[in-house]
Image (tube, rainbow, N blue to C red):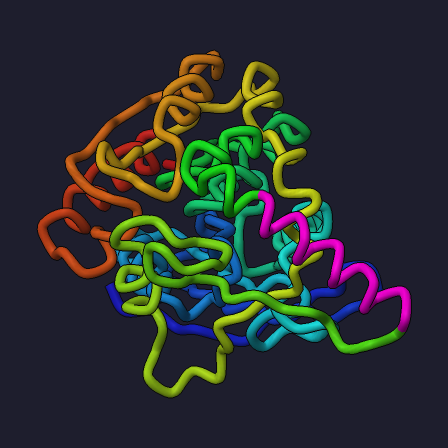
Amino acid sequence: MSFSRFDSCFTSRNTRCKGWLYLPEGAEKPPVIVMAPGFACEKDFGLQTFAERFVELGMAVFLFDYRNFGESEGEPRNLVAYRRHLQDWEAAIAHVKNLAEVNGSKMALWGVSYSGGHIIKMAAKHPELAAILALVPFADGRTYVKTMGFGDMLKATGAGMRDVLHMISFKPPYCIPVVVKPGEFGGLNSLGTYEGYLAQIPDASGWKNEFPARTCLTASFYRPITAAKRVKCPVSIIMGEYDTVIYTPSIRAMAAAIPNCKFAALPMGHFNFYQDEELFERVMKLQSEFLIERLF
């Protein structure tokens, strides 16, 4: 099915956020999926492929950048702040509900990695949602030590405190790398993560591999798993059995706590489905069947 893509902007806390609205040709007020990227990512980091496949099924898609990322406004750039992200999700949901081109009463949310945790939080607050789909979702900040290690957690705390000092003294943010190779210090440094993360990024992207370290001071307090039992809508969770970024027992526990959850564990890591065509098709088949059943 052919489709059109339009720029569509909304405001979150007085800051302009940029999104893309995908519309299937010939469909009148189709159901809609709202999507956003993962940790320190931008909307064009491989998510267009998912959006285009959903549109082929006759669904509209709204894919947006958080404040401080990509084509959205906001400073400092690349600030990963889960409370701000959740505010952006609220603003995006309200924006899409009011779009004349789509059926806002038939809305699903789609998230990957960090945003996969965000949509669990959103679903707990929005029982009117038709469905949510969480791919390799973040579940519990308390498990960071399981994947990062105690030594890196201490370094992260020190870096976070240094960035706070920069902030209160009006200096530029103290940043650390988003992703590094194993043995190096950064936000993500598990086996296979460096190559997998960077493979998502378009060649012409202006994205920088850095983020303000203040994020490290609040990361362990973010626990989407605590909202799981309050989710009323149908949920699809797909986990990678070999995920080295997210502590997989926390994903299983979150899925088990959701009253109406369809859970699948595929033989993949955190990023493999972006490059492996067979894995991508397996993910798409599961998610497409789930969406068709609940949106049409």
Where residue 9 sits: x, y (%)?
A: 65, 70
Q: Quadrant of the N terminus?
A: bottom left
Q: Residue at x 69, y 69 (%)?
A: 174
Is there any visible trace of residue 8 in the rendered image?
Answer: yes
What secondary structure predominates along the stretch shown in magenta?
Answer: helix
Q: Residue at x 61, y 54 (%)?
A: 96
Going by the picture, which residue comes out furthest to the left? 278
Is there any visible trace of residue 98 in the rendered image?
Answer: no
Q: Residue at x 51, y 37 (%)?
A: 150
Please state the total of marks drawn on the protein image.
0
Image side of residue 213 versus residue 129, left or right: right
In the figure, 282 relative to 176: above or below? Answer: above
The magenta region covers 154-169
Going by the picture, which residue comes out furthest to the right? 169
Q: Where is residue 142, by image quadrant? A: top right
Q: Residue at x 69, y 43 (%)?
A: 218
Q: Nearer the viewer, residue 121 or 139?
A: 139
In the figure, 97 relative to 135: above or below? Answer: below
Q: Quadrant of the C terminus?
A: top left
Image side of residue 276 versus residue 116, left or right: left
Q: Nearer the viewer, residue 47 or 254?
A: 254
Q: Where is residue 101, by image quadrant? A: bottom right
Q: Nearer the viewer, residue 228 or 240?
A: 240
In the figure, 69 relative to 196: above or below? Answer: below
Going by the picture, which residue comes out furthest to the front? 151
Where residue 256 sits: x, y (%)?
A: 41, 13
Where residue 200 sits: x, y (%)?
A: 32, 67
Q: Nearer the viewer, residue 54 or 171?
A: 171
Where residue 109 sits: x, y (%)?
A: 49, 42
In the figure, 263 relative to 39: above or below? Answer: above
Q: Is residue 99 magenta?
A: no
Image side of residue 261 versus residue 15, left or right: left
